[in-house]
Structure formats: structure tokens, C-alpha cells
Image (cartoon, grey):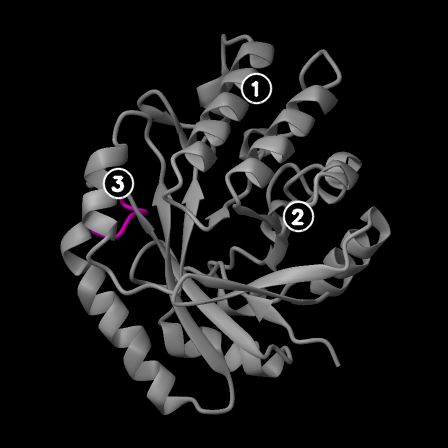
Amino acid sequence: MNYKTDYHIHTTFSDGKAPAKEYIHSALAAGLDEIGFSEHLSLFNENQHWCMNPSNVKSYIEHINYLKDQFTDISIKVGLEIDYIPGGEQELESFLNDLDLDYRIGSVHYLGEKTVDLSPEFYHGKDFNIIFENYFKTVIAAASSKLFDIIGHCDLIRIFGHKPDFDPEHLYREMAKNFKKNDVVFELNTNGRNRPLADFYPDRKYLHIFAEEKVPVCVNSDAHLPARVGQYFDEAYDLLKSAGFTEKATFTKRERKMIPL
């Protein structure tokens, strides 16, 4: 039986809808072997309702570590999903170095001062081709920062179903090569199925590129509700296998281990 993990979970510490304990119960019911929590953190946009205040990070870590002792029939890991903002690398590194985490997910939610995923209004009156390319450049910069172990939803810019007027295969190839060069994992994020896009991140059409470039992968739900822990994982694993993947990444204290898919 394959070892099943889900490292991208949000609770009431950030914008999730339930306390961590409820997600653990859901993970057990879903047959997961390991669950990892990754609350939103942004050092540069602290007043956003969906982010955890930096002052609460250590209490969050303490709470998850407490739950590790309460649930001995499932492995529990603690991480963060951290907003990457170009120019903020040094401050971010200083903050993160004091934290005892199992992994760091780096994600791009912002282009400029606005988020790309909260409202389709962000896209009104803009050239999506330019936005799409800028998003990929920013994700590549996040991976190049070497601050992160996993890059989250690497083409989140697709969230509302917009498509560029060109074939973006070369951008996915550039991204995959960069991820491999900087030794970061990408996630197959199943939560896109619950958004207007109605499919996973990244675009399944280009998954084979990440396999060809030998970029390590993990499957995550990005659950904000307990019922979505491990959601669509059977399909996700089948998709990865058909794209050529045979292994997935697990993490402990930021040490990566590859195990059979």
C-alpha cells in the first residue's frame, strides 16, 4: 500500500474553516498516513484576513507539535505557506530561520499589490498574456530564492479559467528546469478542481515536462475544509503515473526523502 501524504492544509490559524484536530480526523478517515499543516504567512501584507499574523506563528507551531503527541496513528508535520514577494527575500529569510518547520511552501498570490486569486476583477482591463508571463517569472524568482522546499500551485494564475493566446509550453519548460536547478519540489494541487478553473494545478497538459526534467513532486489538497483533505488524490496519482512519475517527496525537518508514488 502506498504511503499517502497531504502537506497543504489550512485551519482557523489562517483562512481554514475548522481547527486542526478536525482535519486530522478527516485525514484518518481518508486513509492518509501523513498530514502536514501549512498556514498562510505574509510578512508584507499582514492585515489580509486570510493570513496568519507573524506574531502567532510560534503558537501555531506549538499547537501542531502538541497534536503530534495526541495522535499517534498518523504522522503530523508542520509547515507554512509563505507569500513570495520580490525584494523581501532577506527579511523573509531572517524570520524563517528562527522557525522549526518540516517544510516551507513558497507561493505567489500577489502580482504587485493585488492578489491574483481572490477576485476575477484583478484581470479586468489587463492583457492576460502579460500577466501570465509575469506570474511565471515571479514563481521562478521564488524558486531561485532558495527559501522554499515546495512551490505551491505554480500556475495559480489559471484560477478563473483565463488562457493566454499562445502555447505556454516553453514557460512550463523554463519553470521546470528552474525548479530542478534550485532543487525544489512542485505540488500537484487538487484544489483547483474546486475553483472556477475546475482542474488541478499545474496544467495537466504540461505535467510530462516536469517528469522529463526530473522535478520532484508531491500531491496536496490545499484543503480549507476538513472534507477536502486528500480530495481527488486517486485521480491525481493516476495522472502523475501517466505523465511518467514514479516517486514523490516527503519531508521531515526540511530533509527531503523520495518514496514510491
**For residue 161, what is the image quadrant?**
top right
Amino acid type of the residue that numbered disc 2 sits on in the rendered structure: Arg
Q: Mark 2 points at which residue?
A: 193
Looking at the image, residue 54 lies above or below residue 47:
below
Q: Is residue 52 magenta?
A: yes
Q: Which residue is drawn at 27% across and 42% down?
A: 42
Residue 24 spot, x, y in % from top left: 47, 78
Q: Residue at x 74, y 41 (%)?
A: 207
Dot 1 or dot 2, earlier in sequence: 1
Residue at the limit of the structure toward the right, as seen here: 242
Amino acid type of the residue that numbered disc 1 sits on in the rendered structure: Phe
Which element is circle 1 on? Answer: helix
Main SS of the magenta segment? loop
Contact between marks 2 and 3 (CB within 8 A): the answer is no
Q: Residue at x 46, y 58 (%)?
A: 224
Assign the N terminus to one quadrant of the image.
Answer: bottom right
Contact between marks 1 and 2 (CB within 8 A): the answer is no
Whether residue 32 can be seen here? yes
Residue at the limit of the structure toward the front, as seen here: 181
Residue 163 spot, x, y in % from top left: 68, 21
Q: Mark 1 points at which residue?
A: 132
**For residue 60, what is the image quadrant?**
bottom left
Which element is circle 2 on? Answer: helix
Seen from the viewer's position, the closer of residues 186 and 51 is 186
Looking at the image, residue 134 lies above or below residue 116:
above
What count of labels does the image hold? 3
Dot 3 or dot 1, earlier in sequence: 3
Looking at the image, residue 151 lies above or below residue 73:
above
Dot 2 or dot 3, earlier in sequence: 3
Which element is circle 3 on? Answer: loop
Please report the bounds of the magenta region as a residue range: 48-53
